[in-house]
Image (tube, rainbow, N blue to C red):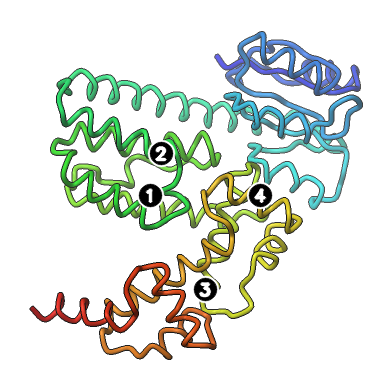
């Protein structure tokens, strides 16, 4: 039985909703009801709750701000919103924060409410089952693993996953993949890595990916790339990120997709995610470890290197144009500063590697 909290400043609305829904048949028990978001925060911190039904407009702390605060505190809660607003655009603000559903106060029919809460209970059942299965697999993996050098190396990989650099930087992920190939010899070790990646994505970016989509039994570790690609795809679909980490990743995606444009700047990236230039610059450095301009230069050089790997005969002018530089001399200077060798020398090395 899942536990539900009703939050609405209108006492009659709270009591009305409690009375019209056959909660036990829907898979819920009512843990309590409170009048605003501030009281709701106190309640969920002190009592076990699985689902919160929350009005969007309330005094003291609105429903939207309550949901944002719960996300910031990483509370394990799901939400359904109540709204007296006919405009779906208004409700979308809540849906972007990852709520399960919404109920219109203007059309609150028992049959509709029952269907919504049964769907919510089904979702919570699936989440609970997935968590149980994951916990069982993790326990089996931990019990089967020996306290060995391999385990210590896998621990280090998991610690690097927690630091999130692999999310923002493709080359960091590639380093982790190579390390995984060397150190994660058995399936239990690879499962630990896969589980940690999916756990971090769910906790930090509020994105749920299914374990079954990633064949961790494969020793080539290519599934690690697929996990990152799936995360980037989900974040790119979001109109508005509900976490700062998600906002920074959305900016990264924008920059990666516009490396060929000379108009790509810190200001254009800040505009894309709706932040001021100064706040964005400080935040980006904090979360990615790079200034915005340094990140753009790094990624442009990495793109140029991949172009050489695909076509060792590419000219410096064509490579410069490919990565958004009109001035090939400036591009050559940036490449040399970043790689420590000239673009022409890098081409020779790649040609030798390919044809030897």
Q: Earlier in the sequence, mark 4 or mark 3?
A: 3
Q: Left of 319 or right of it: where is 312?
A: left
Q: CA distance from mark 2 to mark 3?
A: 28 Å
Instruction: Indicate the quadrant where residue 54 lies.
Output: top right
Between label 4 and label 2, give the one nearer the viewer: 4
Q: CA distance from mark 4 to mark 2?
A: 28 Å
Neighbor class of circle 4 (other Cα within 10 Å; few <14, some 14-19, many 20+) is: few
Q: Are marks 1 and 4 in contact (CB under 8 Å)?
A: no
Q: Left of 102 or right of it: where is 108?
A: right
Residue 97: give its label.
none
Q: Earlier in the sequence, mark 2 or mark 3?
A: 2
Q: CA distance from mark 4 to mark 3?
A: 21 Å
Q: Earlier in the sequence, mark 1 or mark 4?
A: 1
Q: Please tell me whether mark 1 sits on a helix, a strand or a loop.
A: helix
Residue 227: give its label.
1
Neighbor class of circle 2 (other Cα within 10 Å; few <14, some 14-19, many 20+) is: some
Q: Observer-nearest residue: 25 or 148?
A: 148
Residue on which disc 4 sits? 282
Q: Earlier in the sequence, mark 4 or mark 2?
A: 2
Residue at 52% x, 42% y: name it: 207
Q: Please tell me whether mark 3 sits on a helix, a strand or a loop.
A: loop
Q: Left of 292 or right of it: where is 215?
A: left
x, y percent for residue 244: 63, 43
Residue on which disc 3 sits? 259
Q: Are marks 1 and 2 in contact (CB under 8 Å)?
A: yes
Residue at 64% x, 26% y: name it: 73
Please tell me how many numbered marks the rendered image carries: 4
Residue at 56% x, 26% y: name it: 121
Please identify the residue farthest to the left as the structure is shown.
Answer: 356
x, y percent for residue 257: 52, 70
Q: Are marks 4 and 2 in contact (CB under 8 Å)?
A: no
């Amino acid at each position: 039985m899942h536990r539900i909290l009703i939050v609405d400043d209108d006492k009659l609305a709270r009591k009305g909703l409690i009375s019209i829904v056959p909660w036990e048949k829907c898979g819920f028990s009512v843990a309590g009801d409170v009048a605003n978001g501030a009281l709701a925060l106190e309640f969920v911190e002190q009592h076990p709750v699985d689902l919160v039904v929350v009005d969007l407009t309330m005094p003291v702390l609105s429903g939207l701000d309550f949901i944002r605060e719960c996300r910031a505190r990483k509370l394990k809660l799901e939400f359904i919103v109540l709204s007296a607003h006919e405009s779906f655009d208004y409700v979308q603000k809540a849906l972007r924060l990852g709520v399960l559903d919404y109920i219109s106060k203007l059309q609150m029919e028992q049959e509709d409410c029952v269907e919504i809460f049964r769907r919510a209970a089904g979702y919570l059942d699936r989440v609970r089952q997935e968590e149980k299965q994951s916990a069982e697999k993790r326990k089996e993996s931990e019990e089967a693993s020996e306290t060995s050098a391999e385990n210590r190396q896998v621990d280090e990989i998991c610690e690097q996953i927690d630091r999130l650099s692999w999310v923002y930087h493709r080359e960091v992920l590639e380093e982790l993949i190579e390390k995984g190939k060397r150190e994660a010899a058995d399936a239990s070790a690879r499962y630990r890595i896969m589980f940690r990646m999916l756990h971090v994505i769910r906790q930090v970016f509020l994105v749920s990916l299914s374990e079954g989509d990633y064949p961790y039994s494969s020793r080539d570790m290519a599934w690690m790339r697929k996990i990152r690609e799936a995360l980037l795809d989900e974040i790119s679909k979001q109109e508005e990120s509900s976490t700062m980490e998600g906002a920074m990743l959305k900016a990264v995606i924008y920059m990666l997709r516009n490396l060929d444009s000379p108009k790509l700047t810190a200001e254009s990236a800040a505009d894309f995610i709706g932040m001021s230039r100064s706040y964005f610059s400080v935040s980006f450095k904090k979360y990615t470890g790079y200034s915005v301009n340094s990140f753009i230069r790094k990624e442009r050089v990495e793109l140029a290197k991949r172009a050489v790997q695909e076509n060792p005969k590419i000219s410096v002018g064509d490579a410069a144009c490919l990565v958004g530089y009109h001035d090939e001399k400036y591009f050559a200077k940036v490449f040399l500063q970043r790689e420590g060798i000239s673009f022409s020398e890098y081409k020779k090395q790649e040609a030798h590697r390919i044809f030897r």
